[in-house]
Amino acid sequence: MHVVATAGHVDHGKSTLIKALTGTDPDRLEEEKARGLTIDLGFAGAKLPSGRGISFIDVPGHVRFLKNMLAGVGGVDACIFVVAATEGWKPQSEEHLRILSLLGIRHGIVALTKVGHVDDELVTIAQMEIADRTEGTFLGDAPIVPVDAIDGHGMDDLMTALDQLLDVTPTARDDKKPRLWIDRVFAAKGAGTVVTGTLTGGMVRVEDELSVLPQNAAVRVRGLQSQYADRTKVGPGNRVAANLSGVSHDQLRRGDVLVRPDDWHVTHTVDASLQVLESLDRPVTRRGAHLLYLGSGEHPVRVRVLGPDAIEPGATGAVRMHLPIGLPLVPGDCFILRESGQGVTLGGGEILDVDPIVPASRANPDRDVERVVRERGRVDIDHLRRLTGERREPDVGRWAVDPTALAATAGELGLDIAPLDEFARAVLETLDDITVDGVRARATDSIDVLANSDLVARLEADPFSPPDLDNVDPAEIRELVRRGALVQEGGVVFAASAIDEAARVVARLLADQPDGITVAEARDGWGTTRKFAIPLITRLDETGVTRRRGDLRIAGPRLPQL
Ligand SMILES: Nc1nc2c(ncn2[C@@H]2O[C@H](COP(=O)(O)OP(=O)(O)OP(=O)(O)O)[C@@H](O)[C@H]2O)c(=O)[nH]1
Ligand SMILES: [Mg+2]
């Protein structure tokens, strides 16, 4: 399915063409019928010769209703661009073409209408003019089909051209995150609140629990219609009428949006590119009252130009925009910016950042996902997807991490991990050469040292006269000391169990000599030499097993009970 919008100058025959193509008059309001003028959006559907369905959104051409035109073209895939052979290219032809280009529409055909009113020469001139005006735009290579919707001339060719258009127009993307910008709201008899819009981003099903923003109204989908038929589900790229429970129609209006809120980052502030129309007679600055057209809505915005103070006509720059309400936006969303006082279109562009965190004075927005990660150091990947619309593999745990931030965090390893936050611990566990045990993280190979080491056993074999360890890797000793298996004192390394045993020997000696023992007596009790007796007694003094009184050692508070 595809949704195609009309575009073109007032009275050039857009609505007449849609009626001829579909049998449905898109001008549904009494006032429209009376005045022969489209005021608001019209909707109609048809089957093409190929059997394919197509939905049309018919827009008003009058400049006064540009706001309504903008509400209609937000979610469409392609356009029928209408130019009357009787009048040729006119101001709203130009403005509509600019708008469609800025909104990222890349596919369309041109219908040269009312050819029954003019001679062949004028048709040829009009075709040349159109080719000239559209050169370099997305309509540059589009077929220009001469038609007359009243006498039927060329209508078969137009149908064929529409089929060919849909052949080359990609179907709407399915990102599993539906978004329906609401363009109509009404109360249907017996059904309650109905909203319509062009569905993009994903599928909506009956019974879905969704929200309408910015009100944040929780709603349930009671029923769905598309192509004039009831559906249990509708995919992206379709016109949809959704019957909603949980909300009254007078709480909703055009420009609101129906989404699953968990899928989206709801934002009040965005950074965006802004391409200023070449035809504008002045640069765009922060001055003036600005209106943002995005989705089906119109919103007053505060605009700040990033970098220089102004963006000249024809140039593209970056802006930060502050919205009065929160909307579910994603980079790549296109918008139009107008000046509300004089009602002029300034330009348009694409959302680049839906949650700018760098101050405007330093911001340099783009669509690069890594920029978003870099600015934050690390981002939860689900949040990153909401921020960028892109799926990215996590680097660590569930985070995308800037390499610098990762190195900084990894650099803290080998320490007590208690002060680390959940993120840093997740980093830790992913590192091949790091093992976390209890509250400490350390290099895995040092654990292997401990697992395979016979060092402790060698020291325990002769606990009070341990062998010299000159040939042993100091890192291995450090690690075992840190783990409490070894004790290092006065340049000598003992098994930890040797210190405990030494304390028990001293306790026995002191039981016989409560007034104290000399170092020589302790040395003899341990059956060792002075070289080892001094560090052993020093250790016992330090740990409170013994206390020094003159040349004697007496019982300390930690002397083991016998
Ligand atoms: N002879 C002839 N008349 C046409 C053709 N298309 C439109 N008209 C007439 O031109 C007038 C305007 O046509 P609309 O279809 O209302 O024009 P529109 O582009 O929809 O106008 P807006 O929606 O107000 O911008 C009507 O009187 C139509 O009957 C055509 O192909 N041939
Ligand atoms: Mg019309």
Image (tube, helix red, strand yellow):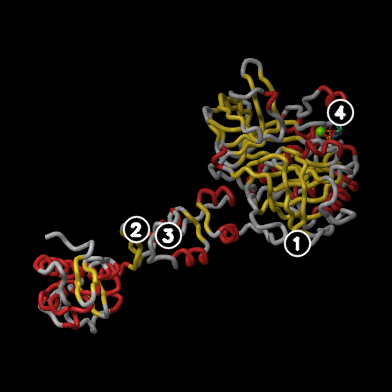
Q: Residues within 10 Å of mark 2 (few under 14, many from 20)?
A: few
Rounded to the nearest angstrom, the CA distance separating label 2 from label 1 is 48 Å
Q: Are marks 3 and 1 in contact (CB under 8 Å)?
A: no
Earlier residue among tags 3 and 1:
1
Q: Amino acid at mark 1?
A: Gly
Earlier residue among tags 4 and 2:
4
Provide residue 428's location: percent of width, then percent of height: 40, 61
Residue at figure coordinates x 88%, y 26% from the top left: 35
Q: Amino acid at mark 2?
A: Val
Provide residue 550's location: percent of width, then percent of height: 23, 76
- Does ligand 1 reach within 8 Å of label 4's beta carbon? yes
Q: Amino acid at mark 4?
A: Gly
User: Does the image show residue 233?
Assistant: no
Rounded to the nearest angstrom, the CA distance separating label 3 from label 1 is 36 Å
Q: How many marks?
A: 4
The mark closer to the camera, 3 or 1, is 3
Provide residue 361's location: percent of width, then percent of height: 72, 60
Most foreground residue, 387 or 477: 477
Rounded to the nearest angstrom, the CA distance separating label 3 from label 4 is 67 Å
Q: Is residue 398 above or below residue 448?
A: above
Most foreground residue, 62 or 553: 553
Earlier residue among tags 1 and 4:
4
Q: In the displayed structure, does residue 48 sit left or right of residue 555?
A: right
Residue at figure coordinates x 79%, y 28% from the top left: 27
Earlier residue among tags 3 and 4:
4
Q: Are marks 4 and 2 in contact (CB under 8 Å)?
A: no
The residue that disc 1 covers is: 307
The quarter of the image that holds ligand 1 is top right
Rounded to the nearest angstrom, the CA distance separating label 3 from label 2 is 15 Å
* Mark sitting on residue 427: 3
The residue that disc 2 covers is: 439
| Quadrant the C terminus occupies | bottom left
